[in-house]
Image (cartoon, rainbow, N blue to C red):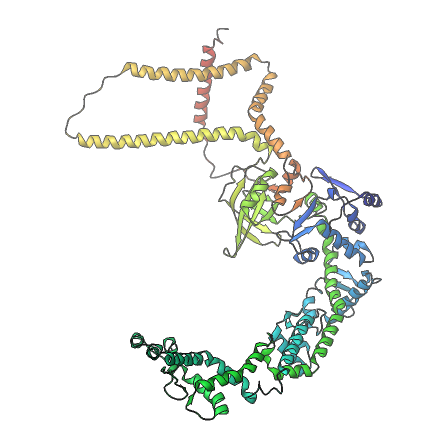
């Protein structure tokens, strides 16, 4: 149940002196002592950095998370952490054991003043003794790793379920096996199927009901008129009853009207339809014919002239019922059959009252033997003995739970109540999956992602440049997805398909391939150069398009010329076209206007600069740069200040309760940029460096100077 602060709880909270540190643009609580953990119940949950986190996809001991997740819904909530701290704190003499982060717990640290504490201390000693460490004074997570095996090896393990292996007496063991065969089983803590008190009660209740029904027919000669063979005879009787009734009814119809005898015996056409079929004695088409040929007043033959599909069943009827009651007969009359129906009526009525049970399969003799053996009370005693050990067995599991809590609760609190590990850099946070190396950088903020498409929707609100990578290893047999935050450098070379290497928290390396990118500003430096890069990229693309068009036009012209030359071969030379002066004059005029406009623009800028004083010129140049880059830098500055860790984690199932900012300095620390080691010797001689064509630079500079002079002359600068 969630703890809701009240006025009374706020008054109590003042008794604990809280300490806070500021990181990420907000205040976070310091949890350094056991008293800080025990007082979490008093801390206003509005001051908690997170209120919930998933049990999957984070770098934390899965067993500890499973123990804390009391409702097993796959999420750890604030109330569950508070409950875990309260439980562990009550079982320790000194709460500071909760902040030591050790994998071992001294037995002397267990508070044995309570009944639960005594049971846990005894269970810890029992675990150590079973491991051959009876003299040990500490218990570790390694010692408690196989407590399930320890419990499974016990004859009684406190779950109230008795498997056959736990029963030493052979006869009683067979009874337990019969109960499982009839009424099912439940898994024991050892994993073996066993019976509980409920299953046992169900079995014996059904057995007593079945035996009472059976006893109601004892010494009733009208039911057991064939002795011990009565039930077997009843099965044979029911097997042919409907067919015999059908036969005698047909014979009565033939007596009613002699014309009915032939069609009721089936017509010749019916036999003709069967002529082309493969007939077996048990074929359905054969079985559908009457037992014998129909005639008025005709008795049922018992040995000859019987439908082949019914010969064996009629034979059983004759041997088990007719012969014992009427002697060896060749036929059975309708009156004798009616007498049999009357004779079987009490038995059929008794069988109709038979209760539906699962124990019937055992047979009445076995059921009576079990009920008379006193096994019900013996099994009840075994179940009671097993339940008596419930507290002791639970204490064994509690030892494992307490050792895990002492090791992990403090770490979890510093990644839940506060994000101390993340913001102080003491250790990686539980949500940091590893480090991605790509494009000459290392990204420390990498989180596991299950569904990239789903994660992007919310993570985009973080204002962080996220690169989603598919990571594989072992020839693609293992695959995960991570989202890496790029908070340093630039995004010029980040593109889908680029490869890198991801190292998880265990040190395992994965092949990483970019599959999606969330574009956001990375740095102010990138924003400063962004306008120039965009213009340069645009000019480069246009020049490439122009060059490609010119190249294609030249190729087309060359092909056309070659074709025309071939077609006009031998036709003589075409007349030479006279030089068109007007045409070329227009071209030169257009070029002159374009160059003049460019010169005027440059000259205007030059005029403005020359009009300034010498110390104003650098300021003007800086202002010009800011005019171009300023808007981009300002937008980037605002976005970088708005970077927030919360949406990245919320998209993974967290409930981040604070505005966990990633400001520029902290963001820079999360992405490492390649740099040479300090003191490294660097040679600047590159034997494969591209040669610099100085003449081209001189030519370009001369053209610029000429354009500037021409522009200045056009605006009358020299005239002044």
Question: Does residue 230 show up?
Answer: yes
**Which of these two is toward me, 569 or 309?**
309
**Which of these two is toward me, 52 or 293?**
293
Q: Name the residue rendered at 61%, 72% in the picture.
A: 184
Quadrant in the picture for residue 463: top right
Q: Position of residue 308 (x, y in %)?
A: 38, 83
| Above or below for 635 versus 106 | above
Left of 319 or right of it: where is 550? left
Left of 381 or right of it: where is 111? right
| Above or below for 306 versus 166 | below
Q: Position of residue 74 (x, y in %)?
A: 64, 54
Left of 692 or right of it: where is 616? right
Q: Residue furthest front?
A: 256
Q: Residue furthest top?
A: 720
| Above or below for 190 versus 7 | below
Q: Position of residue 570 (x, y in %)?
A: 14, 29
Left of 688 or right of it: where is 57? right
Q: Position of residue 314 (x, y in %)?
A: 43, 85
Quadrant in the picture for residue 290: bottom left
Question: Does residue 162 show up?
Answer: no
Q: Name the residue rendered at 20%, 30% in the picture.
A: 565
- Number of marks in picture: 0
**Which of these two is toward me, 382 or 46?**
382
**Which of these two is toward me, 77 or 378?**
378
Quadrant in the picture for residue 124: bottom right
């Amino acid at each position: 149940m969630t703890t809701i602060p009240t006025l009374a709880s706020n008054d109590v909270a003042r008794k604990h002196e809280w300490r806070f540190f500021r990181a990420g643009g907000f205040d976070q609580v310091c949890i350094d002592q056991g008293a800080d953990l025990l007082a979490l119940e008093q801390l206003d949950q509005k001051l908690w950095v997170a209120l919930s986190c998933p049990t999957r996809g984070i770098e934390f001991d899965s067993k500890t998370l499973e123990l804390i997740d009391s409702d097993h819904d796959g999420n750890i909530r604030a109330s569950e952490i508070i409950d875990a701290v309260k439980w562990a704190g009550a079982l320790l003499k000194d709460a500071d054991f909760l902040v030591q982060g050790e994998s071992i717990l001294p037995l002397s640290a267990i508070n044995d003043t309570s009944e639960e504490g005594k049971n846990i201390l005894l269970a810890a000693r029992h675990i150590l003794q079973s491991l051959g460490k009876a003299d040990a004074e500490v218990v570790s997570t390694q010692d408690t790793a196989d407590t399930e095996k320890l419990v499974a090896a016990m004859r009684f393990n406190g779950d109230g379920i008795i498997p056959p292996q736990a029963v030493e007496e052979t006869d009683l063991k067979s009874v337990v096996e019969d109960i499982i065969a009839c009424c099912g089983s439940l898994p024991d803590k050892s994993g073996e199927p066993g019976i509980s008190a409920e299953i046992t009660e169900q079995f014996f209740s059904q057995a007593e009901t079945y035996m009472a029904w059976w006893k109601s027919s004892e010494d009733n000669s009208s039911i057991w008129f064939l002795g011990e063979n009565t039930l077997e005879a009843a099965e044979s009787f029911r097997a042919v009853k409907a067919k015999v009734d059908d036969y005698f009814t047909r014979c009565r119809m033939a007596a009613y009207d002699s014309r009915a005898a032939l069609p009721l015996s089936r017509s010749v056409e019916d036999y003709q339809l069967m002529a082309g079929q493969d007939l077996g004695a048990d074929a359905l088409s054969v079985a559908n014919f009457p037992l014998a040929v129909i005639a008025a007043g005709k008795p049922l033959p018992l040995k000859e002239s019987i439908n082949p599909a019914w010969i064996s069943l009629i034979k059983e009827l004759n041997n088990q019922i007719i012969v014992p009651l009427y002697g060896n007969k060749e036929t059975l009359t309708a009156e004798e059959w009616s007498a049999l129906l009357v004779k079987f009526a009490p038995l059929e009525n008794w069988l109709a009252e038979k209760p539906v049970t699962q124990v019937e399969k055992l047979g009445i003799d076995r059921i009576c033997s079990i009920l008379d053996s006193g096994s019900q009370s013996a099994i009840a005693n075994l179940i009671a003995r097993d339940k008596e050990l419930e507290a002791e067995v639970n204490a064994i599991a509690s030892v494992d739970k307490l050792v895990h809590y002492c090791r992990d609760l403090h770490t979890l609190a510093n990644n839940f109540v506060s994000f101390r590990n993340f913001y102080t850099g003491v250790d990686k946070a539980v949500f940091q999956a590893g480090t991605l190396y790509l494009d000459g950088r290392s990204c420390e903020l990498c989180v596991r992602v299950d569904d990239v498409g789903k994660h992007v929707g919310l993570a985009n609100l973080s204002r962080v440049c996220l690169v989603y990578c598919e990571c594989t290893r072992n020839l693609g047999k293992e695959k995960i997805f991570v989202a890496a935050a790029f908070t340093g450098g630039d995004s010029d070379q980040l593109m889908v398909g680029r490869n890198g290497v991801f190292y998880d928290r265990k040190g395992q390396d994965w092949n990483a391939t970019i599959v999606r990118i969330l574009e956001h500003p990375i740095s102010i430096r990138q924003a400063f150069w962004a306008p120039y890069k965009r213009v340069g990229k645009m000019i480069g693309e246009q020049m490439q398009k122009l060059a490609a068009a010119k190249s294609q036009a030249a190729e087309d012209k060359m092909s056309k010329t070659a074709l025309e030359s071939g077609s006009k071969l031998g036709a003589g030379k075409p007349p030479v076209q006279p030089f068109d002066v007007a045409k070329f004059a227009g071209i030169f005029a257009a070029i002159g206007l374009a160059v003049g406009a460019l010169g005027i623009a440059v000259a205007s800028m030059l005029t403005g600069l020359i009009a300034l004083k010498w110390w104003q010129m650098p300021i003007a140049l800086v202002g010009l740069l800011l005019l171009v880059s300023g808007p981009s830098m300002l937008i980037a500055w605002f976005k970088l200040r708005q970077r927030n860790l919360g949406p990245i984690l919320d998209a993974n199932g967290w409930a981040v309760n604070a505005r966990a900012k990633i400001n520029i300095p902290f963001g820079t620390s999360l992405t490492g940029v390649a740099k040479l080691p300090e003191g490294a010797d660097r040679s600047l001689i590159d034997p494969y460096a591209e040669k610099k064509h100085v003449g081209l630079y001189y030519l370009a500079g001369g053209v610029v100077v000429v354009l500037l002079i021409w522009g200045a002359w056009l605006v009358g600068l020299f005239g002044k």
